[in-house]
């Protein structure tokens, strides 16, 4: 590093090294404020934060745009086009984001060097050129990897949070038709995978519904009545169950981790206290639980809704149990 450099602390951040490699980035740099603002050694930190903020905003816009396109893609419902549209949209949005990130990292590096030395990076000579390239490459790869993780997880969360699952519309259509329609739908085969995560099921009345293995993660179940329902192994993690009634429902192995059961009622419900050990619930309600083996739902399965002849015809193994007509 040169010791007799003049103090260039008050300078306009330029593309420098990046401009010599990608001169086409100059318009993008102007958009990000490069060349429009003069930073001093004392204000360079603000410039760094500004660059990182711009990348964060661009990443959020990128994630929302991709999520919206995927949602519209599903609404169109043409499987042959789904993959092509997803790849095309990913490329169209990802390329500007990559360029945005690269320019921001370059600017942040120059400003950081300004803070440390009080000099413009380009005046440092060639000895730090390779260092900058290495730092930019590592930072770029790391930021892109983090972006992919946030995109995948964030997109999944937004879809559930905003109720964008096409399957959930189908679930609600059967719920609205009543108990018989729902039970026929969910017991049509052995694979349920019904997910009501983040949905609003508040103030609904469910009597005799088959909800075995159904997920209600973070759902709003305020004032909902589950009366004589099969909720075995249902997942209520983080669900809002304020003033929710589980009257005579079968709750064996249901997961209520971090669920809010304020003023909830377990009157006549069949379950085990251990399933509520991480839930927010009045301990006096747990004393109302009855043994699961006394419930009519004990050991029940989707097979109980089909005749032995139907099960044999479909190739399912059956046990000697009462059929749906006699048991339900």
Image (tube, grey):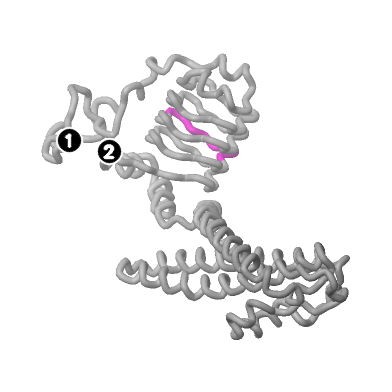
Q: State the residue at coordinates (65%, 71%).
A: 129
Residue on which the image places disc 2: 190
Quadrant location of the N terminus in the rendered image: bottom right
Asked whether 211 falls inside the magenta stretch, the response is: no
Q: State the residue at coordinates (54%, 43%).
A: 219
**19 vs 321, nearest the viewer:** 19
Instruction: Tell me the CA gap for discs 2 and 1.
Output: 9 Å
Residue 136: mark: none
Q: Secondary structure at mark 1?
A: loop
Image location of residue 276, percent across then percent down: 55, 24
Quadrant location of the C terminus in the rendered image: top left
* Left or right of residue 279, residue 47 in this image: right
- Toward which corner of the image does residue 211 lie, by quadrant? top left
Let me know if residue 203 appears in the view. no
Residue on which the image places disc 1: 316
Let me know if residue 233 appears in the view. yes
Q: Dot 2: few (<14), some (14–19), or many (≥20) neighbours within 10 Å?
A: few
Q: Is residue 240 above or below residue 110?
A: above
Asked whether 227 falls inside the magenta stretch, the response is: yes
State yes or no: discs 2 and 1 in contact (Cβ < 8 Å).
yes
Image location of residue 282, percent across then percent down: 64, 22
- Toward which corner of the image does residue 27 lie, by quadrant? bottom right
Which segment did they paint magenta?
221-228
């Amino acid at each position: 590093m040169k010791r007799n450099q003049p103090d260039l602390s008050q300078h306009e951040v330029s593309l420098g090294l990046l401009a010599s490699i990608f001169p086409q980035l100059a318009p993008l740099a102007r958009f990000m404020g490069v060349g429009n603002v003069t930073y001093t050694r004392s204000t360079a930190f603000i410039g760094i934060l500004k660059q990182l903020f711009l990348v964060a905003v661009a990443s959020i816009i990128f994630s929302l745009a991709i999520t919206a396109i995927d949602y519209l893609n599903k609404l169109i419902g043409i499987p042959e086009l789904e993959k092509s549209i997803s790849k095309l949209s990913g490329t169209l949005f990802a390329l500007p984001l990559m360029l945005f990130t690269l320019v921001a990292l370059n600017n942040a590096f120059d400003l950081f060097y300004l803070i440390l030395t009080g000099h413009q990076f380009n005046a440092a000579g060639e000895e730090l050129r390779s260092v900058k390239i290495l730092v930019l490459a590592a930072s770029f790869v790391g930021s892109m990897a983090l972006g992919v993780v946030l995109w995948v997880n964030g997109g999944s969360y937004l879809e559930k949070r905003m109720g964008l699952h096409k399957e959930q519309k189908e679930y609600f259509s059967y719920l609205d038709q009543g108990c018989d329609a729902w039970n026929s739908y969910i017991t049509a085969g052995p694979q349920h995978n019904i997910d009501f995560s983040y949905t609003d099921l508040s103030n609904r009345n469910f009597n005799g519904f088959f909800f075995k293995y159904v997920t209600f993660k973070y759902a709003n179940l305020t004032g909902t009545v589950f009366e004589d329902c099969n909720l075995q192994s249902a997942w209520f993690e983080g669900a809002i169950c304020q003033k929710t009634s589980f009257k005579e429902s079968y709750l064996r192995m249901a997961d209520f981790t971090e669920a809010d059961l304020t003023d909830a009622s377990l009157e006549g419900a069949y379950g085990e206290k251990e399933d509520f050990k991480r839930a927010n619930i009045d301990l006096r309600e747990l004393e109302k639980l009855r043994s699961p083996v006394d419930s009519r739902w004990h050991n029940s399965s989707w097979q109980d809704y089909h005749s032995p002849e139907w099960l044999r015809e479909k190739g399912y193994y059956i046990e000697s149990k009462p059929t749906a007509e006699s048991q339900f």
